[in-house]
Image (spheres, rainbow, N blue to C red):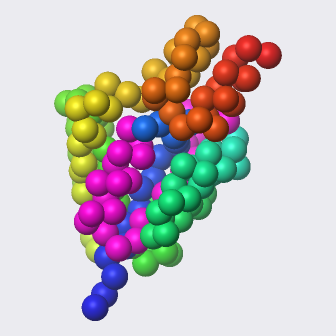
Amino acid sequence: MKKRKAIYPGSFDPITFGHLDLIERALELFDEIVVVVASNPSKKTLFTAEERMCFIRDAVKKYSHVTVESWDGLTVDFARKSGASMVIRGIRATSDFDYEFQMALTNRQLAPEVDTVFLMPSESHFYLSSRVAKEIAQLQGNVTDYVPKMVAKRLTKKFRS
């Protein structure tokens, strides 16, 4: 039986419990998931790609079918290279949908063999984003309910030093 492999690309700057929620949901659908720390030239990140990969690896270490890699090119090129047939994307609101729908159609045109699956977060993570977690940390707030412990420590250190 062919294994169902998907990639979950994003900047993950940093990974949140919302991202982890989507990974857990995706594990119900796919045999293998590659979390792809993608480079986006239009985004300035707080953490390096290596730091973000370290955070993700620590957060997903209990899942044997989840791996983490980085990529600087087109998402569909990574999907092809890794043998994945699906791209996982999270959608929180209609504003997410507009952007994600456009990207999914563009990816389909670039690589018709790679499709996109949209997943919604649980209600408890619906509002959560990396941006919100960074803003809370920057304003000296407690982020332990939003990000894994390792990330919370690094965010706190980043904004208090």
Q: Which residues are magenta?
A: 18-47
Q: Residue extending furthest bottom?
A: 1
Query: Residue 110: where, in percent of width, then height?
Result: 35, 64
In this image, 69 relative to 7: left or right?
right
Front residue (pair 159, 36):
159
Q: Is residue 56 magenta?
A: no
Front residue (pair 45, 160):
160
Query: Residue 25, located in which quarter of the rendered image?
Result: bottom left
Q: Please count the marks in the image.
A: 0
Query: Residue 17: where, in percent of width, then height?
Result: 43, 38
Query: Residue 100, located in which quarter of the rendered image?
Result: top left
Q: Residue extending furthest top?
A: 139
Q: Quadrant of the N terminus?
A: bottom left
Q: Residue extending furthest right?
A: 161
The answer to whether any part of residue 161 appears in the image is: yes
The answer to whether any part of residue 71 appears in the image is: no
Q: Residue at x 46, y 29 (%)?
A: 146
- Residue 105 sits above or below residue 126 on the image: below
Query: Residue 14: where, in percent of width, then height?
Result: 56, 36
In this image, 4 relative to 66: left or right?
left
Query: Residue 12: where, in percent of width, then height?
Result: 52, 41
Q: Quadrant of the C terminus?
A: top right
Q: Residue at x 49, y 74 (%)?
A: 82
Q: Residue at x 66, y 50 (%)?
A: 54
Front residue (pair 130, 44):
130
